[in-house]
Amino acid sequence: MKKIIVTGGLGFIGSNLIRFLIKKNYFVINIDKVSYASNFYNTRDFSNKKNYKFIKLDINNRSKFKKILNLHKPLAIFNLAAETHVDRSIDGPAEFIRSNIVGVFNLLEVFKEYSKKNKKAKLIHISTDEVYGDVLKGRSKETDPYKPSSPYAASKASSDHLVYSYVKTYNLNAVITNCSNNYGPNQHPEKLIPKLIYNIINNKPLPLYGKGENSREWIFVDDHCAALFKVLQNGIKGDFYNIGSNINSSNLNIANQLINIAKKKFKIGKNVKIKFVRDRPGHDLRYALDSKKILSKLKWKSKVNLKKGLENTFNWYFENMKYYTTLKKKDITKRLGIIK
């Protein structure tokens, strides 16, 4: 059975990708350092599968990572090991530099040596649309310059540059993907949609930064996983692929849609009201991707529309309230990213 490594596989996108790959009959090795955003609840439905293995490891540990590669000889690595929350990067950038830049450097060094004997092995580095910065008009193309606004986005931009430099200098078989805002099951409630769902269910106000006008391109996580699989199959070495749905929505619209979904399921509490709060420092107004390249070159496009995706997501959290109990309450409710 062909083996694939997914780093950061206890997280949101990583765990959904592993589920996708297992269904495709790959043997998946999940490497995760087990941080606050890691959650074994995310892997409960496949943790006992014969074609799944979990290894606790920080990708900064070169020697152990090297041993794992040489032992299992994976045909590919999907790198999703990263710190991802913008607000946390404002409060504490150091961990983002260590994980997202130094961690990627160490992964590249190990993969570079591994590739000498396993020339067909492929690295898919998963990044973000936030590297392009504020996009007030149009949609970001793969050839557009990077203008990151937050320490998080800057750390991801740096990691993209590192990966590409190893392609050019060492002829590494690597591909970089930049995806828009993901949503769906297993997402940590520090992020907008699961936080709003938690607050609706628990009769709490719905906090939105500024006036809720910030616009994001939303993609259901299963669509993202399908795109990554296309990149595994046919992605060209050294290429960048934007992965997006072409569906933009304001945070205010997302909140209102979730309220309407909830009303169809139960009588919502009187405290469930939108509350505008102090904006995040350096908050970009709009992200939007041009995904024509992956559509034309790899024949991929998103399938789940926003209305259906939000309904599926709300239903998952509503039916998996135990998920929230696996997290520290302060990680759900505490406001981060305020410069005093």
Image (spheres, rainbow, N blue to C red):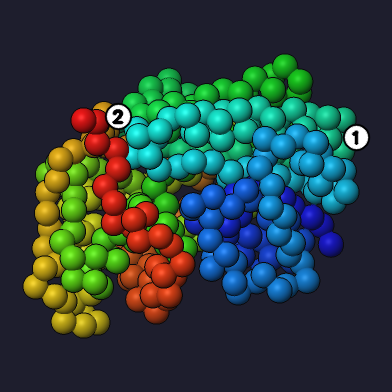
SS at badge 2: loop
Q: Percent x, y for residue 189?
A: 36, 58
Which residue in the structure is indicated by mark 1?
Answer: 117
Q: Percent x, y for residue 36?
A: 49, 52
Q: Give amino acid for label 2.
A: Asp
Q: Quadrant of residue 286?
A: top left
Furthest-top residue in this view: 169
Q: Percent x, y for residue 272?
A: 14, 67
Q: In the rendered structure, find residue 82 and report the number of the disc placed on it.
A: none
Furthest-bottom residue in this view: 266
Q: Percent x, y for residue 50?
A: 78, 71
Pick the front one: 262 or 101: 101
Quarter of the image for the N terminus: give it. Answer: bottom right
Which residue in the structure is indicated by mark 2?
Answer: 134
Q: Is residue 163 visible?
A: no
- 287 relative to 304 in the view: left or right: left
Pick the front one: 166 or 102: 102
SS at badge 1: helix
Q: Quadrant of residue 196?
A: bottom left
